[in-house]
Image (cartoon, rainbow, N blue to C red):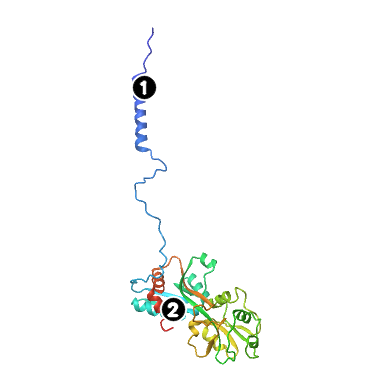
Amino acid sequence: MAQKSSPPPIVFILIFLLLAGGGYWFFFMKKPAAQVNTNLPVAPPAALPAAPAAGTAPTSVPAGTTLKIDGATSMVTINENLKRGFQAQFQGSTVTTNAGGSDKGIQDLLAGRVDLAAVSRPLTAQEQSQGLVAVPIATDQIAVVVGKTNPFSGGLTNTQVADIFQGQINNWSAVGGPAAPIQVINRPAVSGTNKSFQELVLKGANFGITPNIITLPRDETTGLLRALGNNGIGYATYAQVATQQTVRVVAIDGVTPGTANYPYQRTLFYIYKNPPTPAVQAFTGYATSPQGQQAMFVGN
């Protein structure tokens, strides 16, 4: 019986070389496309600076820290008091304040001209979508005021105030006063106090457009008080008129400003653009701390 012939030796040599080369490639050269070494430390994603913690005053601030504020005229006293307290506690810091109105403060903030906007109304949804963040710092009351020489000496109901500022009541005799026309002195639409009054008193309705209602060209309390005369009525933040000798605050539904259950109350805010700078974090932290809250109302 014939024997099978064996392959020549060269064939075994070639097979061995192919197997050896394949094994080397498999164990030493091939790298899985999506292999991750889970034993290596993974750096956490970068985080935005933390928002200022309410009620936490900074222990120090870098030398030469500067901060610019613009906004509500109703927050002039608060801004100035906090400025003095902050600069006294942190020597070498500089705070600059202005009062062009809530809307202007927000415009300047978005444009990068200021670091904080002092605002006497909540942010709108559109403003929040632009990265603005509100820090509540105080509660304020809006007083209805008449001139000291005004013959009307009574109080008003909430409904009567709304009717007066919507032009439905235009004579003092309709609210228990003398037979004399009512001159309404309104703040401009850029005023945060205007918007707050519209929400609190008019429930979002528009101010009246009648001959006896005039709107000031600028948002200024001093100009408003001067314009009251002996038949005018207007409104201002209570802190700015509480000690005025030329005007009288009007009780609303029997309640005068300065009491806890007074109906026209609102929240005041500092607004910053996210992420906050270290100077913004320091100042808002100070403003909401016990030290800042005490300094805020010094002399009020």
Where residue 208 appears, x then y in whole percent?
64, 79
Q: Residues within 10 Å of mark 2 (few under 14, many from 20)?
A: many
| Number of marks in the rendered image | 2
Look at 34% across and 24% down and name the residue there.
13
Look at 34% across and 77% down and name the residue there.
89
Disc 1 element: helix
| Lower sequence index among marks 1 and 2 | 1
Answer whether residue 71 is visible to the viewer in this image.
no
State the residue in front, 158 or 5.
158
In this picture, residue 289 sits left or right of residue 130: left
Q: Residues within 10 Å of mark 1 (few under 14, many from 20)?
A: few
Q: Give the residue number, with chain letter if any, for mark 1.
A: 11
In this picture, residue 166 sits left or right of residue 110: right
In this picture, residue 210 sits left or right of residue 6: right
Q: Indicate the quadrant where residue 148 lies.
A: bottom right
| Residue type for callout 2 | Asn
Which numbered circle lies on residue 270?
none
